[in-house]
Amino acid sequence: MRTRPSYRDISLYSPPAVPCRVDLSDNTNLFGVPPAAERALREAASSLITRYPISYAPDLKQALSQYTGFEPSWLTTGCGSDDLIDCALRAFLEPGERIAVPDPSFSMMSYFARVNGLQFSPVPLRQDWDIDVEAMLATGARLLYVCSPNNPTSTVASRAALERLVDAAPGIVLLDEAYTEFSRGSNVDLVRSRPNVLVTRTLSKAFGLAGMRVGYAIGRPELVAEVEKARGPYKHNGVAERMAIAALTEDLPWVKAHAGEVQALRQRLVEALEAMGLKPLPTEANFVFVPFPGAIQVAARMREQGVNIRAFQGLTGVGEALRIGCGPWPMMEAALGALREAWR
């Protein structure tokens, strides 16, 4: 069977999945489901299953409008924020054009570039972990991607760097704010002051709905309209949409309280790691990133103790590192105990 030459050697995204008693590997909400969303799941009418949802999710857009302060025409939704990133690449780039991405950053970006027939230009982060604006612009890419807070480093792009990038970009700047609820602030206001910014977000992290796959994007109506062409009409199942609306309209205090708890817990985790002699990076996400040689072996020994965290190797400017998700403190204590044992 004939396939595209650039497509043929792509392998599936498959992070290691191991049965374990404590899983801190995927940056999801470890505090459970917002109560209103869980109630919406239990009370879902059969018609949400047997019928198609309303095209392009107008009710969900209305709920997101109340949450974000942007009019529904400035919003689009998708099957997780990664779906919207994929849609944006198809909407704004022709095959063969280039995308520039800080390195390291969201690992799916190189995958999305290849499946869409794009050239991929990774640009190393600066030594202070900020984005290298001049190097990104020098690639000539017509779409520039920035994840802030960044996955996996947990660091943020400075406001000054983002403004320079947006103002000099030859095309779209796609700002991924999947972890914004855990940070000290968002840069979403750039979409009102600049015509070339698209911000993607998700309900998979702070909202605890990763399994429901609901994401959204914010941008000028003319940008959003192009993304919606690539999106298609039915990107959410009806139950997921109803759960998302319930969480957005009834459970924001729950979401904000647990995001605040994560901020406190990650500081405790950072202090405990530093007491062990490790040097985690500054974090504004719901995880802590810890570079050190031997991280791969340490993670493997932790898995033998039933604790799963994400290990990285060969990262530009980093080498090996661990990424530890933040959850209730008993889970953190279990992870720290396994890490101390594995470290020995």
Image (cartoon, rainbow, N blue to C red):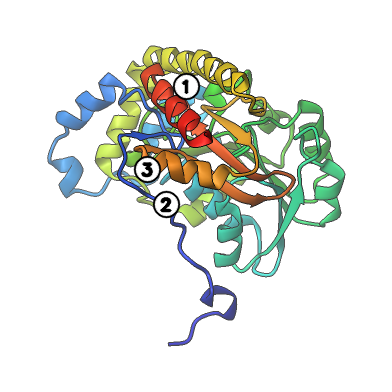
Point out the residue furthest to the front here. Answer: 344
Write down the residue under mark 1.
Answer: 67
Horizontal side, residue 100 vs residue 215: left or right? right
- Above or below residue 53? Residue 41 is above
Between discs 1 and 3, the one toward the N terminus: 1
User: Residue at horizontal 31%, vertical 22%?
Assistant: 34
Viewer-nearest residue: 297 or 217: 297
Which numbered mark, 1 or 3, is in the foreground of this view? 3
- Above or below residue 140? Residue 30 is above
Helix, strand or loop at mark 3: helix
Q: Which mark is residue 16?
A: 2
Q: x and y percent of residue 290 in the render?
A: 61, 33
Between discs 3 and 2, the one toward the N terminus: 2
- Above or below residue 8? Residue 342 is above
The amino acid beneath tag 1 is Tyr
Point out the residue furthest to the bottom here. Answer: 1
Quote the CA–CA distance across marks 1 and 2.
Answer: 35 Å
Q: Residues within 10 Å of mark 3 (few under 14, many from 20)?
A: some
The amino acid beneath tag 3 is Glu
Helix, strand or loop at mark 1: helix
Write down the residue under mark 3.
Answer: 304
Viewer-nearest residue: 27 or 65: 27
User: Residue at horizontal 61%, vertical 58%?
Assistant: 110
User: Residue at horizontal 55%, vertical 53%?
Assistant: 108
